[in-house]
Amino acid sequence: MKYTLQDFKSDQEVKWCPGCGDHAVLASVLRAMPEVCEEMGYNKEQFVFVSGIGCSSRFPYYMNTYGFHSIHGRATAISTGVKVANPELSVWQATGDGDALAIGGNHFIHALRRNIDINIILFNNRIYGLTKGQYSPTSKLGIVTKTSPYGSIEQPFTPGQLVLGARGTFFARSLDSELKLNQEIMVQAAKHKGTSIMEMLVNCVIFNDGTHMEFSERSVRADRTIVLKHGEPMIFGANRDKGLVLDGDKLKVVTIGENGITEKDILVHDAHTSNIGIHSMLVDMKYPDYPVALGVIRDVEDKTYNDNVHNQVKEVKEKSKIQCMEDLLHSGATWTVK
């Protein structure tokens, strides 16, 4: 069956603030799902959307799929259970920077370590929005919020570095308004076997408006971000005349045509290399020293937890003398009463 985005759109009123970046991410997911079905041979009934607590966690209500609106920080644990119990399902998780990286941080890193085949959309607006504006694990140093009236003194997480440090096999980043890029990322995430992390840099118009504006504003975006594609040179800029080269053990921004630099000197993105060195440099690039990296940064193969569980269960069953309940009841220390 050929699906359209309307097949995945629920009849529920979307209750995010006007201008919230979550609207754009929802639109991207609705556009991506029919393509995922076509690419993977899925039926709509195979999709499950799980969420925790936060503005983005209203997501399952807006999808015409199976869904589970869970509790704060525990969406990853529930997603894990759903996938292990029914590996034929395509499990998607909507979570925020607070829900995933603070109270849910432990579940988050261990899902990555185990490489469970789930797709996590991480909405990063650098603030707790649902509870009306407290600083989060990704909030900028010095930000003034209700819980940091004199400025936050905490260094923020870079989600991509956290993913790599936990042995993550798939990490992508995008802006809420980049609908086409978001759709491409989501399709690639669905194809990936393992934990896929999609960091969506979203805007909270009420409590942290413009947090990504220094590089996300359309008038400067081309010069301050770089969209990475596997197998293509790392070139960016409004005139496509800037690129990245390796200078010793660091990345360096160069201008093509200056100082003898040609397109052949520019690094080619390899998302599939197991070596995290360049990937780590890419996720850590920050404006104004570097362009902010968007697109699929890492996509490598590894065994998945859910496959390992089912293979182990199968192996144990094949070797076990216990094949049914009667075998179990008559195993070990048993006796017959006459």
Image (cartoon, helix red, strand yellow):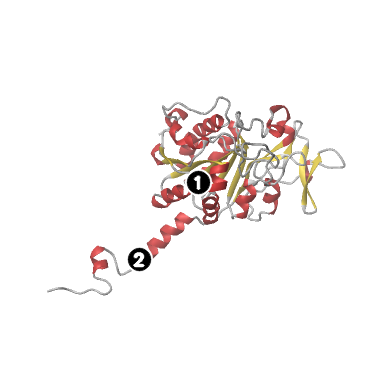
Q: Residues within 10 Å of mark 1 (few under 14, many from 20)?
A: many
> Tag on residue 129?
none
Numbered disc 1: secondary structure: loop
Q: Is residue 162 above or below residue 34?
A: below
Residue identifier under label 2: 318
**Image point (60%, 42%), residue name:** 136
Question: On the picture, is 193 further left or further right than 83?
Answer: right
> Tag on residue 73?
1
**Quadrant of the rendered image containing residue 41:** top left
Question: On the picture, is 322 further left or further right than 74?
Answer: left
Residue projecting furthest to the front:
149
**Image point (58%, 42%), residue name:** 97
Using the image as rendered, state which of residue 130 and residue 195 is in the foreground.
130
Question: On the picture, is 254 further left or further right than 59?
Answer: right
**Image point (39%, 49%), residue name:** 86
**Can residue 3 be seen in the rendering of this structure?**
no
